[in-house]
Amino acid sequence: MVCVYCSKKTQVINTRHQTKHNQIWRRRKCSACHAIFTSLETTDFEQLWLVINKKGQLQPFLTDKLYLSVYDSLKHRSSAISDARHITRTVVSLLLGKIENGTINSSLISDTTKVCLNRFDKTASIHYQAFH
Ligand SMILES: [Zn+2]
């Protein structure tokens, strides 16, 4: 990976496996400008998972689409952007154990999202259920 400030080579100075979210956190240092920044390595689910919608059609799983629906339900909170990011990651982690042959029903995604939102913010869960 190249430096985000000067585009020169970087080296990894610390690595941690984050099993909860199935990702690798890395601290990187630029060999030229000595800037330090963090990178995350995670699975690209959009290339792997297909969603079976209510009509039985297959669609790619879009993390951004999930994030937007969660964010929309949390808009009443001042921390909606970061809350939606954390809840989206939690939903995706929970879906990992429910994937069968690379496909998942859209109803399972919405049910899992409802459960997560209900634990976090009941108003958001009610809002989400009204649209899903
Ligand atoms: Zn640099």
Image (cartoon, helix red, strand yellow):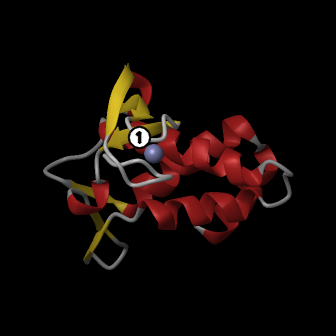
Q: Nearer the viewer, residue 49 or 1?
A: 1
Seen from the viewer's position, the closer of residues 69 and 14 is 14
Instruction: Write down the quadrant of residue 17 in the picture.
Output: top left
- The quadrant of the rendering that contains the C terminus is bottom right
Q: Is residue 82 left or right of residue 92?
A: right
Furthest toward the left, the residue is 101
Identify the residue shown where x is 50% and y is 57%: 110
**Which corner quadrant of the figure contains ligand 1?**
top left
In this view of the protein, can residue 54 be seen by the observer? Answer: yes
Residue beneath the point at 67% across and 60% down: 71
The answer to which quarter of the image holds residue 93 is: top left
Task: Judge whether 68 appears above or below 42 on screen.
Answer: below
Q: For label 1, count other residues whose C-alpha is less than 10 Å away and answer few (under 14), some (14-19) or many (20+).
A: few
Of helix, strand and loop, which one carries label 1? loop
Q: What's the amino acid at mark 1?
A: Ala
Q: Position of residue 58 (x, y in %)?
A: 24, 73
Quarter of image, res 109: bottom left
Q: Residue at x 49, y 43 (%)?
A: 89
Residue in front for this viewpoint, 9 or 37 = 9
Ligand 1 has an atom within 8 Å of the beta carbon of the residue at disc 1: yes
Vertical arrangement, residue 6 with respect to residue 92, above or below: below
Q: Is residue 18 visible?
A: no
Residue 132's place in the image compared with 102, above or below, is below
- How many labels sit on residues? 1
Please name whichever residue, 5 or 113, is drawn nearer the observer in this view of the structure.
Answer: 5
Residue 40 picture location, percent across and down: 40, 39
Q: Which percent across, then down, holds residue 108?
A: 41, 52
The residue where tag 1 is placed is: 32
Residue 80: x and y in percent read 75, 53
